[in-house]
Amino acid sequence: MTPLISRRATGRSGLVTLICGALAAGGLTAAGVATLEPGAASASSHREAPLISGTPQYDNTDVYAFVSPDEPDTTTVIANWIPFEEPAGGPNFYTFADDAQYDIHIDNNGDGQGELLFRCTFTTHRKNGDTFLYNTGPVTSLDDPDLNITQTYDIDLIRLKDQHVMSKTRIADDVPVAPSNVGKASMPDYGALRAQAIHKAAGGARTFAGQADDPFFLDLRVFDLLYGGNLSEVGRDTLKGYNVNTIALQVPNDLIRESAEQPVVGIWSTTQRRNAQGYYAQVSRLGNPLVNEVVNPQKDKDKFNASVPWDDAQFLKNVTNPELPKLIEAIYKIPAPAEPRNDLVDVFLKGVEGLNRPPNVRPAEELRLNTSIKPSAHPKRLGVLDGDNAGFPNGRRLTDDVIDIALQVVEGELVGAKNDLGDAVDANDKKFEHRFPYVAEPTAGSRGALAKGTTEGADVRSGLADALRPAGSSAGSGNTVLIAASAASGAAGVLLIGTALAWWRRRLQRPY
């Protein structure tokens, strides 16, 4: 078995042909990219930089952008925050920050600057400050009195020219956020809550904000010196069972692209946090996956998150002379491709010639999407690398295996070094939805242990049932708190029944 191997793609004609053609036709040279102004702008950022790892509410984990498969006249953009949300992590569950601006930027003319900005801001509401509970009973709707902690959000569409605001239009006003999925007892029909959180805006747009299953699938033991140097744990989806907070937009293609003749858009996201003086400072940026995690060195990571695209020439050497191939060579003896890596610059900073490169492009690390390319009826996980032009790096679909794609390209797939490198995690642990917002429902707190693949869940629940039964009572007593596990349905959780529930709700109605 080849080190870091994944199943081989059935074809390599797509991206290889396009890139080789671009390079042969007078593509980039070291001198040609030296004048880069907007450069490597964004990254997949599950705790990717020292400062942002300590403030997860502001940490943007991934950005996805794709032509909507069920409504191809629209584009869906999904941006996620707060990595590694443990589903049972109460009593203070996961909220967006009230002092942040969560921004999605659209560059529709290839100049490296945003012409459109979708700005999302949040407000937290509390019904009862005299309880420690996130919810005080089963929640059946977003306006349920038992949902104690709620959030609402606004989205403004801001039109820019040379970074100056030209107009501002509110497309979402005081819209409810889908809550954290506390568990089956608290939220017996979470799907209904999610459906209520989908907002239909004017002009055919849709918005959603709330918790979701983390759609990124990969084996993060890569940071243990590339899977421990012996592949003993390769193939484990580290993010299985964890959730994120999601902002999703579905907007008409004609709203975001410059014209039908110029359908390519560049997309990235940022988080700005308000400081003590009331001013906002940028603390996170993200477009293409993995840049700030594995391309930028430690000395550049915080600087990168706080900088702007048009000042990113300072990071160019991190792309043309990447560290990862040298690390793989040192551990697995796979020769690193020759430098400078102009193939990486061509793909990730300019877009692919004839696919998703806008005319007169200024190099900038953006997630570039050609909105005129129709969705694939049968998407391939390796995207353009396997001949599927509707996939990464032409935008990024939820099912695109960006780890395998990135490893193969970084190891020289486009410059003749054929390889099948990957992490052996080829799909998400949960199926994605067929309709907006497409991301899978979050793992419930009552199923958190089993969802992460442990074998301890049933034993833990059995032990809790005994521990929580009052001394001298028998199983099934109407005055007990019963822990029930349903093997037939696979849905297990804490069920508050009988007079215990009635007593609890009466108690909450009285002041302490």
Image (cartoon, grey):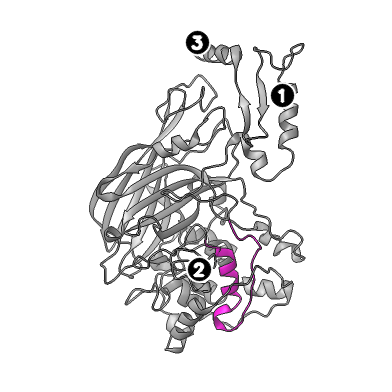
Per the image, the residue denoted by label 3 is 510
SS for callout 1: helix
> Can the viewer see residue 317?
yes
Going by the numbered disc 1, the residue's amino acid type is Ala
Q: Residue at x 52, y 30 (%)?
A: 188
Residue 417 part of the magenta-drawn span: yes
Q: Which residues are magenta?
A: 400-427
Residue 164 part of the magenta-drawn span: no
Task: Please say if 437 is above or below 89.
Answer: below
Q: What is the number of the mark on residue 369?
A: none
Alpha-carbon span between mark 2 and mark 1 = 48 Å
Q: Position of residue 245 (x, y in %)?
A: 49, 44
Going by the numbered disc 3, the residue's amino acid type is Arg
Per the image, the residue denoted by label 2 is 383
Q: Position of residue 114 (x, y in %)?
A: 33, 62
Per the image, the residue denoted by label 1 is 465
Residue 125 as seen in the image, left or right of residue 492: left
Q: Earlier in the sequence, mark 3 or mark 2?
A: 2
Q: Earlier in the sequence, mark 1 or mark 3?
A: 1
Q: Position of residue 26 (x, y in %)?
A: 42, 88
Q: Residue furthest front?
A: 488
